């Protein structure tokens, strides 16, 4: 039997990279999908590709920085599929190349608004529905930047460290209600966001020297871990932090 048969899932940032891989993995395992993102043309492409595989998927374009969008995405899941069982908070933005004294207030606020407050908004909207059903699974996508020091990304690291702490708070607060919450912390993954780095061996090779498995991860490899945590196979797993990083944090 498919691991997510009869489940309804919402994935933010489902238009590319890790989010797209998660959405497609969930559909293969029987879930009905709602994907969100800011680029409607990319969302439409993913919906079409899933439809060609006989999967059920709809898109709700918008930003997690918009409270109305968060409510609309959850409302669409209920309206179209009758429930919401799984939320994956994947949408995020990066900020690289500046130390903290070089960082302006606007950039700091923007990164935290998307990577942290956006998760708060989406989770608040989703939990309200999950409480009605007495069950649910939330998986947050963080980063190894929350686990180890990585140069020149202070706002990104701060947002992801706070996301890990928020995950534990959610897990504790809602365990009695049948709602689980876990966080996945990927290392370097071959996504469109990382494409410029992947194309530059002079930059890439020194980074990969810190990874015992000397290659970037694949979005599908992250999706497989998220699939487990979202499924009932992980029924006794909550509040966990799961690095998927080719061994980088084991050094």
Image (spheres, rainbow, N blue to C red):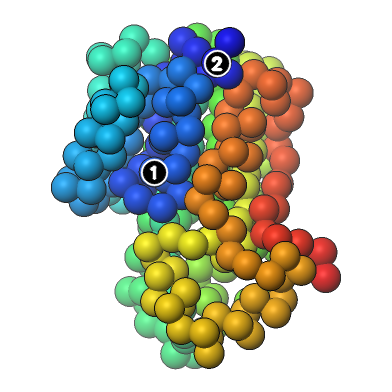
> How crowded is the residue under tag 2: few (<14 C-alpha within 10 Å), some, or many (20+)?
few
Alpha-carbon span between mark 1 and mark 2: 19 Å
Asked whether residue 175 is in view, the answer is yes
The residue to which callout 2 is attached is 2
Residue 89 image offset from top left, x and y in percent:
46, 42
Asked whether residue 62 is in view, the answer is no
CB contact under 8 Å: marks 1 and 2: no
Please name the residue shown 44% across and 43% down the image. 21
In the rendered image, which quarter is residue 105 located in? bottom left
Left or right of 59? Residue 55 is right
- The total number of labels drawn is 2
Mark closer to the chain start, 1 or 2: 2
Please name the residue shown 46% across and 18% down the image. 30
Q: Quadrant of the N terminus?
A: top right
Residue 23 image offset from top left, x and y in percent:
41, 35
Q: Which is more toward the observer, 21 or 241?
A: 21
Please name the residue shown 52% across and 84% down the image. 201
Q: Which is more toward the observer, 74 or 41?
A: 41
Q: Which mark is residue 20?
A: 1
């Amino acid at each position: 039997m498919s691991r997510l048969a009869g489940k309804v899932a919402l994935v933010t940032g489902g238009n590319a990279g890790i989010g797209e891989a998660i959405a497609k993995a969930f559909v293969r395992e029987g879930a009905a999908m709602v994907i969100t993102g800011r680029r409607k043309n990319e969302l439409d492409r993913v919906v079409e590709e899933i439809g060609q595989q006989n999967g059920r998927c709809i898109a709700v374009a918008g930003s997690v920085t918009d409270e109305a969008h968060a409510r609309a995405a959850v409302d669409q899941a209920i309206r179209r599929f009758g429930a919401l069982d799984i939320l994956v908070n994947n949408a995020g933005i990066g900020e690289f190349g500046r130390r903290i004294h070089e960082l302006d207030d606007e950039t700091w606020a923007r990164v935290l608004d998307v990577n942290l407050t956006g998760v708060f908004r989406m989770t608040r909207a989703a939990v309200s529905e999950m409480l009605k059903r007495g069950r649910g699974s939330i998986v947050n996508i963080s980063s190894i930047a929350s686990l180890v020091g990585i140069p020149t990304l202070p706002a990104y690291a701060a947002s992801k460290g706070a996301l890990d702490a928020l995950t534990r708070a959610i897990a504790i607060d809602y365990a009695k209600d049948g709602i689980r919450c876990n966080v996945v912390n990927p290392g370097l993954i071959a996504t469109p966001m990382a494409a410029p780095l992947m194309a530059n061996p002079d930059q890439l090779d020194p980074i990969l020297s810190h990874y015992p498995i000397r290659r970037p991860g694949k979005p599908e490899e992250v999706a497989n871990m998220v699939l487990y945590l979202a499924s009932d196979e992980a029924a006794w797993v909550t509040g966990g932090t799961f690095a998927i990083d080719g061994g980088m944090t084991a050094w």
